[in-house]
Image (cartoon, rainbow, N blue to C red):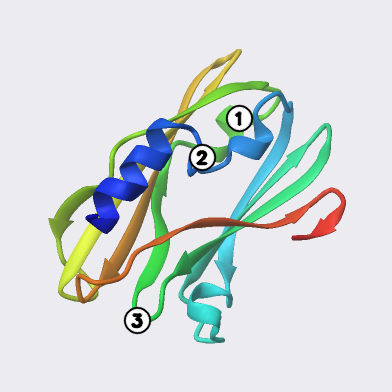
Amino acid sequence: MDKGLYRNLRVLAGEDTMFREIVGCRINHVILGHDTYSNGSDKGDGTKLTFKTDAGDFVYVAYGDCCSESWVESTDPLEELAGATVTRIEQSETQNVDGTRQEYDTVDFVTLVTDKGYWKLEFRNSSNGYYGGSMVLYATPEGKV
């Protein structure tokens, strides 16, 4: 089965939806920065996104499989999430776009639906066409995953 189709089916079923762990949490603050966890290396091309919530901190890192790179390309202003409670997550089907860092890129658009409105994030992965990536839950209020 096509890897992209399989992932899109898992997203539709809610199994691979990014950030699903923060549904029901009130966001106090969001920090977007760089980290060294992409590809398990220390080259620093990964993106780290920390949601400081009423339930504690949820830390996500961009992870690119094998020979790919993953990152958060853009977001709505981070301060728009302050004081908002996440009610659900909407994630687009993975789309192919022109390559930027490598030969092929994919993009996912993720929307956090809150009691204050909508907040959007653009996630990208660049590879040779055989690998993908995602935002991986790295730490929860209970500790590292």
Coordinates of residue 58 in the picture (x, y in percent): 72, 48
Q: Secondary structure at mark 1?
A: helix
At a point 57% along the width and 57% down the height, the residue shown is 136
In this rendering, is residue 116 above or below 78? above
* Disc 3 residue crowd, few under 14, some 14–19, many 20+, Cα 10 Å: some
* Residue sticking out furthest to the bottom: 42
At a point 66% along the width and 38% down the height, the residue shown is 21
> Which numbered marker is on residue 15?
2
* Mark earlier in primary sequence (3, 1): 3
- Residue type beneath disc 2: Glu
Residue carrying label 3: 67
In this rendering, is residue 20 above or below 145? above
- Residue type beneath disc 3: Cys
Coordinates of residue 108 in the picture (x, y in percent): 33, 45
**Labels 3, 1: front one:** 3
- Residue type beneath disc 1: Leu
**Labels 2, 3: front one:** 2
Q: Quadrant of residue 3?
A: bottom left
Q: Secondary structure at mark 2?
A: loop
Coordinates of residue 15 in the picture (x, y in percent): 51, 40
* Mark earlier in primary sequence (1, 2): 2
Q: Nearer the viewer, residue 124 or 32?
A: 124
Residue carrying label 1: 81
Q: Secondary structure at mark 3?
A: loop
* Disc 1 residue crowd, few under 14, some 14–19, many 20+, Cα 10 Å: many
* Residue sticking out furthest to the left: 98
At a point 28% along the width and 68% down the height, the residue shown is 126
